[in-house]
Amino acid sequence: MKLDGQHQVRKAVRELCVFARHNLATDPPFSKMDLIVCRNVLIYLEPELQKRVLSVFHYALKDPGFLLLGVSETVGPLADFFSVVDKKLRIYAKKPTSRRFDLSPTSLDQRFEKTGLGRTARSTGEAGGGPSDLLQEVDRILLSKYAPAGVLVNEAAEILQFRGHTSPYLEPAPGQASLNLLKMAREGLLMELRVAIDKARKQNAPVRRERLSIKQDGGSVQVTLEVIPMRGPARERNYLVLFERVPPSMPGSTTPSATLRPKRTATARQIENLRQELTATKEFLQSIIQEREAANEELQAANEELQSSNEELQSTNEELETAKEELQSVNEELTTVNEELQQRNAELSQVNNDLNNLFAGISIPIIMLGGDGRIRRFTPTAGKVLSLIPADLGRPIGDIRLNPDLSDLEQVCKHVIDTATVAEREVRDRDGRWYSLRVRPYETADNQIDGTVITLTDVNALKSRVDQATTARVAAETSVDSVAVPLMILDAELRVAWASRSFCETFQVTPEETTAHFIYELGNGQWDIPALRTALAEVFEKNIGFHEFEAEHDRGRVRAKTMLLNARPMPYENKARRMILLAIDHITTRRQTEHELRIPGVGAATGEVAG
């Protein structure tokens, strides 16, 4: 899938794979693999390293397992260990083999060193010209013609290599084919070979047996046998077995005195041969007896160890039975835990998807910061408003130049984390838009503060409406203050919410003495009239005003006045927030004129100011 302009393997595929860096030349190989794909790698390696890598592949594959190479690559060095499945596509299958490859890094280094030395020697020889090659060829011919015949065997007496003409001393044994030296030895050599190899093994030194008689072409010949111990490449012990025929004595070499001696009869020679064979047999039997005694001692010790091991195994078996029961219970618990974890993983995946969709669909700019001030998440709207990009995830908020400019945002976040309080302020971006910035602590499920949550609310339209409302209110108050009629606004508790300038001038009070005070407490209580209380209460209950409520104001800082009160409820849906507009008509002069002319009263309800 594509993520931030790059391609990423899907999570479902990643959970099925193991990703690891691996050095084919030095790291231990993997095992039990069904398929190895190695295309266009071997062409860049030296032949020795190619052989090493192919040996690693052979070891790592199952039986059968498949190897896929590049179109220009083959398994040439190890062609006997792989079968061709598709020659065109370079697909090979592993062949089963009993051979064990040496995959240790030290062996590879040794081979490189030897290869380097060989190259140096070849380069030196080539620099010297042709005589060096000629001498080597001469040495090869002389060694092949005059060196003694022999074989190289391992610890099990299996022949690893033939040297020279060995048919006079060895011959294939009848039956199943075998390269065992003791099975191929001619008559007369078997016992001597056993004794010599055993002695060389024990002494770790060359052993030489001379004038051994063997049967050959119906006759008897004498042979000298030599066994030389050697170390193999993997610190294995090998043996070089050399055969050298003893030439018969020449007839012309006899002296005159020798001719006078009686010739040895055939019986004497046979007795001598038998005597030698008897001596060899005694030595062989003695070695076998010693081996048997040593083996018996070892077997006895091994038997005792096996008995103690058997007792330990019995106790171990009981422990394993107990452990098996415990493991079964633990397995059941793990199965339950695994199911719970799978359920939680599914829930977490669902929550993560919900959170991603919520962030994608929400229109409020939101940023989540960690305790170190680094960005964890932000909504797409926050990316647009604050000029953030996906690469900013994990960066400190103080290293990013935001729009609007919030130079002290990092300090504000630290203060919120330290004090566990909420910080609010209004900010303005470069385009002149206003936002309400709110920084609150990020609380975990265990009530630990682990960062902050930053939200931005666009208040540009609201601020414009507030400014307009403020301007309208100031204009309305200015207009009302210009009216000559005293006006007063009472809230639901009959407190003075506002009083006009005409009211303050008429009754000679200040706004501080009027605003937020009960109407009945104004002045010296001259507004505390029972009839007025009842009338104002009916205004709130019935939402109906009253007209021309006559009252006399004869106390306070001014002389007696006669007033007509007019009340009107101000419309508001919430009953608890209703208000009353109270208008006061000053009719003192009119009442004085009527009194002078002795005009009867109008008959309006008259209220006297309580004492």
Image: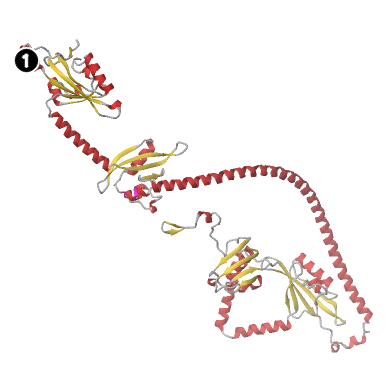
- Please provide the residue range marked out in magenta: 398-402
Can residue 268 be seen here? The reply is yes
Image coloring type: secondary structure
Callout 1, which amino acid? Thr
Viewer-nearest residue: 465 or 128: 465
212 vs 266, left or right, is left
| The C terminus lies in quadrant | top left
| Residue 450 shown in magenta | no
The answer to whether 320 is drawn above or below residue 511 in the figure is: below
Disc 1 crowd rating (10 Å Cα; few below 14, some 14-19, many 20+) is few
Quadrant in which residue 199 is drawn: bottom right
Q: Which residue is mark 1?
A: 593
Q: Position of residue 363 (x, y in %)?
A: 35, 46
> How many numbered callouts?
1
In this view, the residue farthest toward the top is 611
Q: Image point 85% across, 77% down: which residue?
A: 213
Q: Image point 57% across, 43% down: which residue?
A: 340
Quadrant in which residue 465 is drawn: top left
Quadrant in which residue 571 is drawn: top left
Magenta-colored segment: predominant secondary structure: loop
Q: Image point 35% across, 38% down: which residue?
A: 415
The answer to whether 62 is drawn above or below residue 262 in the figure is: above
Viewer-nearest residue: 349 or 169: 349
Q: Position of residue 505 (x, y in %)?
A: 12, 23
Viewer-nearest residue: 277 or 236: 236
Q: Position of residue 261 (x, y in %)?
A: 92, 84
Q: Position of residue 229 (x, y in %)?
A: 73, 69
